[in-house]
């Protein structure tokens, strides 16, 4: 589900950058636009994870990021998780992400650094958004 969520998130990021590139007449996603591109990229992950506990991809997958008490992590945990933790996970050639497969709590290195967990959202079905759409259609058919 996390891989599915990542694929959805990167699709959203690509659409976001293409749209911003067109709207700003090429000032975003251009060769000399690295600072604002990095800000937008990390901002998407930090703000959505910190405030909502989930990005668009995690919402679609029916999963959520929580802290040790099961609450949405907030910005103080989202910043090290999304910036430092994921950077370390990438520069270790993906070992920080592969760690998820072998860890008892299914935490990646970025989760270990921030003290967060990714769990199935209690009101979500599998595969997340698709499950919610199908359940809604089944209710409509019964009426």
Image (cartoon, rainbow, N blue to C red):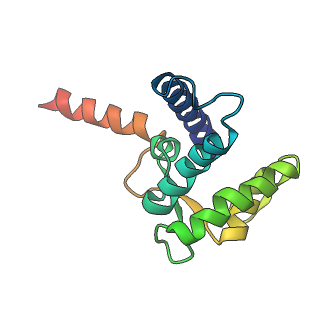
Quadrant location of the N terminus in the rendered image: top right
Q: Nearer the viewer, residue 14 or 141?
A: 14
Q: Position of residue 133 (x, y in %)?
A: 33, 33
Q: Position of residue 73 (x, y in %)?
A: 52, 68
Q: Is residue 133 left or right of residue 26?
A: left
Vertical placement of 4 versus 71: above or below?
above
Residue plotted at (61% across, 63% down): 79
Q: Position of residue 65 (x, y in %)?
A: 54, 60
Task: Say how many tags the image has.
Answer: 0
Vertical placement of 116 versus 83: above or below?
below
Residue plotted at (67% across, 65% down): 80
Which residue is the extreme one toward the left?
143
Q: Is residue 79 left or right of residue 47?
A: right
Q: Quadrant of residue 82?
A: bottom right
Which residue is the extreme one toward the bottom?
69
Residue plotted at (46% across, 71% down): 71
Q: Nearer the viewer, residue 16 or 77?
A: 16
The reply to whether residue 1 is visible in this rendering is no
The reply to whether residue 128 is visible in this rendering is yes
Quadrant location of the C terminus in the rendered image: top left
Q: Nearer the viewer, residue 87 or 123?
A: 87
Residue plotted at (37% across, 54% down): 123
Q: Position of residue 50 (x, y in %)?
A: 50, 62
Q: Quadrant of residue 121?
A: bottom left
Vertical placement of 12 versus 124: above or below?
above
Q: Nearer the viewer, residue 54 or 14?
A: 14
């Amino acid at each position: 589900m996390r891989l599915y969520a990542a694929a959805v998130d990167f699709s959203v990021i690509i659409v976001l950058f293409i749209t911003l590139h067109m709207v700003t007449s090429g000032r975003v996603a251009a060769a000399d636009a690295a600072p604002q591109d990095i800000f937008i990229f990390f901002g998407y992950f930090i703000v959505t994870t910190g405030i909502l506990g989930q990005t668009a991809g995690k919402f679609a997958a029916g999963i959520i990021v929580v802290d040790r008490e099961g609450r949405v992590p907030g910005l103080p945990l989202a910043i090290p998780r999304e910036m430092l933790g994921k950077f370390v996970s990438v520069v270790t050639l993906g070992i920080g992400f592969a760690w998820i497969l072998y860890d008892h709590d299914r935490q990646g290195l970025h989760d270990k650094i921030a003290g967060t967990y990714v769990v199935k959202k209690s009101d979500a079905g599998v595969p997340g958004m698709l499950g919610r759409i199908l359940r809604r259609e089944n209710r409509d058919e019964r009426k």
